[in-house]
Amino acid sequence: MTVKLRLSVMMFLQYAIWGSWAPVLSAYLQNDLGFSGIQVGVIYSLLPLATIISPFIAGQVADRYFASEKLIAILQLSGGVVLLFVASITDYSMMVWVMLFYSLLYAPTLALTNSIAMINMEDTEKDFGVIRVWGTIGWIVAGLSLAFWRSVAADQQMLALQGDTLVLAGIFSLVMGALAFGLPHTPPQKEGASPWAFLEALKMFKSRNMVVFFIISFIVATELQFYYVLTAPFLTSDQIGISGTNISGVMVIAQLAEIVVMAFMLPKYLPKYGIRKVMMMGILAWPIRYAIFAIGGPTWLVVASLTLHGFCYVFFFTAAFIYIDEVAPEGIRHSAQSLITLILLGFGNYLGSIFSGMVQSYYTTIESGTNWTGVFLIPFYLTMASAITFVIFFKEESRESLEAV
């Protein structure tokens, strides 16, 4: 098996694990276990919290002493066992602690898989996108597999397992753990980067434009969690009426759109219109999607609006990472990437998970259930305000101007 194929399989399984539970776990927690919105938000906040912590664990201790492929194998095998155990848990307090433990096992592998891929590629700029897209394909296959599993289980009750979304994730994790021993050998880097490296990039805050950029990025990251945490409960509610059997299959529409936008539209529009206009299109897609969710119908329009995820995510988040790489001064480019990652995937997603759960609980009563219009008007207002602020105040910086700050 070639190196490129092994790395592609690695990415496929890495995101198949995440894609097995992240889109639909919230529906299981609310509809089957009766957890509140706040409780679901807390559980979803655990992986972002682990993302904040993991550089201080895997980045600074473990990967200095273990080859990356062996570390991935150990973490994924352990994570698979933990996921299978989580599937049997119905108590909220216990689930929080066990999911936190699982998140601390999984979060380091996000960086490790990127690292092992880049180190073992002949041409990173040419090959990384081709290999990384298999992660999105893995996410899609996981969603379709879960939908197929539930469809078959409707007739074969012996297959109707509690926490099937977590069981599927656990199976993928065990498979990846076993196959990871066959990844290209990547010995530990004795001189790893400091976990505080992002502090070197704080000098970029001297630029007003960069302050605007980072603040808007943080706000939009918090609102992303309204999609990840609440879309499945919303779509399976009586208002929309998608069945729990089909929900994971329906939600892969978002990832299909992500592939199209990533592979065909971003390479075309970014050189043509520039980073500011592309990001502007991306940020405007957010309030449009949440406006449709707030209206709450017709069902076909709500489902069709899932395609906006491709524009929301790729035209804003992917473009944001590209922008930082282009403008950060040479000496702090890696630190700048660490900073934007911490803002988006760490603090933004963590607080967004908590916030989205609190908003749902506020708009939920025993008598009437969840007022989804009220819930999704909150991210609509916040992303619309962010879009207006971006259009008015954000101006592109250049590497030269930031070096002069």
Image: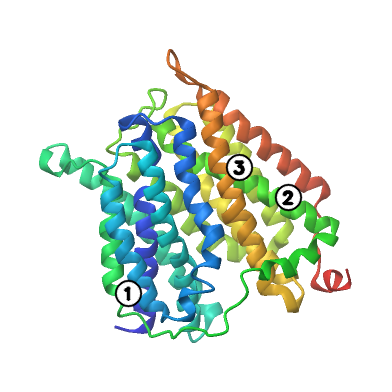
Q: Residue at x 55, y 31 (%)?
A: 358
Mark 3 Cα within 10 Å, few/some/many (few <14, many 20+)? many
Residue 215: image tag: 2
Q: Which label's residue is closer to the chain start, 1 or 2? A: 1
The reply, left or right, for residue 244 in relation to residue 258 is: left
Q: CA distance from mark 3 to mark 2?
A: 16 Å
10 Å crowding of disc 2: few (<14), some (14-19), many (20+): some
What element does badge 3 sit on?
Answer: helix
- Percent x, y for residue 60? 54, 73
| Residue that lies at the very extreme toward the right in this rendered image | 404
Q: Amino acid at mark 1?
A: Ala
Residue at label 3? Answer: 286
Quadrant (top left, top right, bottom left, bottom right) of the C terminus: bottom right
Local SS, label 1: helix
Residue 288 sits in quarter: top right
Residue 24 appears anywhere in the view: no
As drawn, 217 above or below 405: above
**Residue 396: x and y, percent?**
79, 61
Amino acid residing under circle 2:
Ile
Circle on res. 180: 1
Q: What amino acid type is highlighted by mark number 3?
A: Trp
